[in-house]
């Protein structure tokens, strides 16, 4: 009788599978990982490049993966198309009901992908140079006034460890304008209370220093004095703001907390952590800060991104003219 012997998987393969469950590899689209078409293989190489060479965040990697999966599904087994094929794909996205902003994001993904193909000599010219992003109205960022900010920060229950933590997180968020992912992943040693600065790692794995106001530091010190230890119950954690299990809060969990405290403060319109980031920038500009300083603190690579807040500067300039010009 012949007995089939099952050959164990190579150790390296088992290690890769185990590692993939704990990093961005494990979050990539399954369809893209199994893709064997020419464009699919190039997309996989591009995502590896973005993860290892460019150091993109998991959120950016997930967005690239989702966009490219949709693109590969559209072109099938064909080579990456040229300009006409790309226009057909963009028409398909528009007809599918995607907003102008979503189509513009897909164009950004395609430009990065084709730029990679050009650098690897897979293509001779970059057809995305001739693609125009769809025009869309630039929305003015939503922000809270000072009274609403104060009500929101004071909304958490300071008799509970979680309330003291949330109060500290809201205080730091408004005081620094951090992105929600940056706030949730702050390390215990990232805040220097004596100097009034914190260190954060933003998009593209870039680090920056951001000043922190006195009231926010006091809120963090109150949290560290007892509430953090009460949540950990003897556990250790490298994160500044922790859950009862010792990990950091997820972005989604903090979004829900912010919305809940907003309702308690009487702010019933759609409230997200990004609204506090917008409020931080808006109030700085209202107070006389220059756009370049706000850009650095927000971690924007391009000042054009920060210019969405110029509506505040324009209103302040008009007030200045009306107040000081003799013939205003």
Image (cartoon, helix red, strand yellow):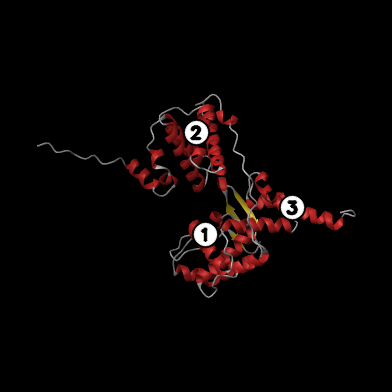
Residue at 51 percent across and 25 percent down: it is 123
* Number of the front mark, 2 or 3: 2
Residue at 48 percent across and 60 percent down: it is 253
Q: Secondary structure at mark 3?
A: helix
Q: Which mark is residue 198?
A: none
Residue 140 location in percent, x, y? 65, 51
| Placement of 142 over or under 302, stated as above or below | below
Comes first in the chain, label 3 or label 1: 1
Comes first in the chain, label 2 or label 3: 2
Q: Which mark is residue 89?
A: 2
Disc 2 + disc 1, Cβ < 8 Å: no
- Crowding at label 1, few (<14), some or many (≥20) Cα neighbours within 10 Å? some
Residue at the limit of the structure toward the bottom, as seen here: 159
- Crowding at label 2, few (<14), some or many (≥20) Cα neighbours within 10 Å? some
Q: Secondary structure at mark 1?
A: helix
Reading the image, the residue beneath label 1 is: 255
* Number of the front mark, 2 or 1: 2
| Placement of 2 over or under 186, stated as above or below | above
Reading the image, the residue beneath label 3 is: 313
Q: Is residue 250 in view from this perspective? A: no
Q: Is residue 1 left or right of residue 16?
A: left
Q: Using the numbered discs, state the Cα–Cα distance from disc 2 to disc 3 in whole angstroms.
A: 39 Å
Q: Is residue 118 left or right of residue 70?
A: right
Residue 100 location in percent, x, y? 57, 42
Q: Quadrant of residue 150?
A: bottom right
Comes first in the chain, label 2 or label 1: 2
Q: Using the numbered discs, state the Cα–Cα distance from disc 3 to disc 1 in whole angstroms.
A: 29 Å
């Amino acid at each position: 009788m012949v007995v089939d012997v099952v050959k164990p998987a190579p150790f390296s393969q088992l290690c890769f599978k185990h590692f993939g469950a704990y990093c961005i590899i494990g979050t990539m689209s399954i369809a893209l990982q199994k893709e064997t078409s020419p464009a699919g293989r190039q997309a996989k190489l591009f995502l590896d490049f973005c993860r290892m060479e460019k150091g993109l965040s998991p959120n950016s990697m997930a967005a690239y993966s989702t966009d490219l999966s949709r693109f590969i599904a559209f072109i099938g087994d064909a080579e990456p198309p040229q300009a006409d094929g790309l226009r057909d794909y963009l028409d398909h996205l528009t007809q599918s009901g995607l907003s102008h902003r979503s189509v513009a994001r897909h164009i950004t993904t395609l430009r990065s992908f084709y730029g990679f193909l050009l650098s690897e000599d897979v293509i001779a010219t970059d057809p995305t140079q001739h693609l125009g992003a769809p025009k869309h109205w630039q929305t003015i960022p939503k922000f809270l006034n000072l009274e609403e900010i104060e009500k929101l920060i004071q909304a958490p229950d300071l008799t509970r460890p979680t309330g003291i933590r949330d109060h500290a997180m809201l205080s730091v968020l408004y005081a620094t304008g951090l992105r929600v992912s940056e706030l949730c992943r702050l390390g215990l040693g990232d805040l220097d209370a004596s100097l009034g600065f914190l260190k954060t790692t933003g998009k593209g794995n870039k680090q920056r220093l951001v000043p922190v106001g006195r009231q926010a530091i006091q809120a963090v010190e109150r949290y560290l004095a007892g509430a953090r230890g009460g949540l950990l119950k003897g556990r250790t954690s490298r994160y500044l703001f922790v859950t009862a299990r010792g990990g950091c809060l997820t972005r989604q969990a903090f979004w829900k907390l912010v919305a809940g405290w907003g309702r308690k403060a009487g702010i019933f319109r759609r409230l997200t952590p990004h609204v506090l980031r917008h409020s931080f920038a808006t109030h700085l500009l209202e107070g006389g800060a220059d756009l370049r300083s706000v850009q650095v603190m927000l971690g924007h690579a391009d000042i054009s991104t920060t210019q969405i807040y110029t509506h505040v500067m324009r209103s302040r300039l008009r007030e200045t003219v009306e107040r000081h010009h003799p013939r205003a």
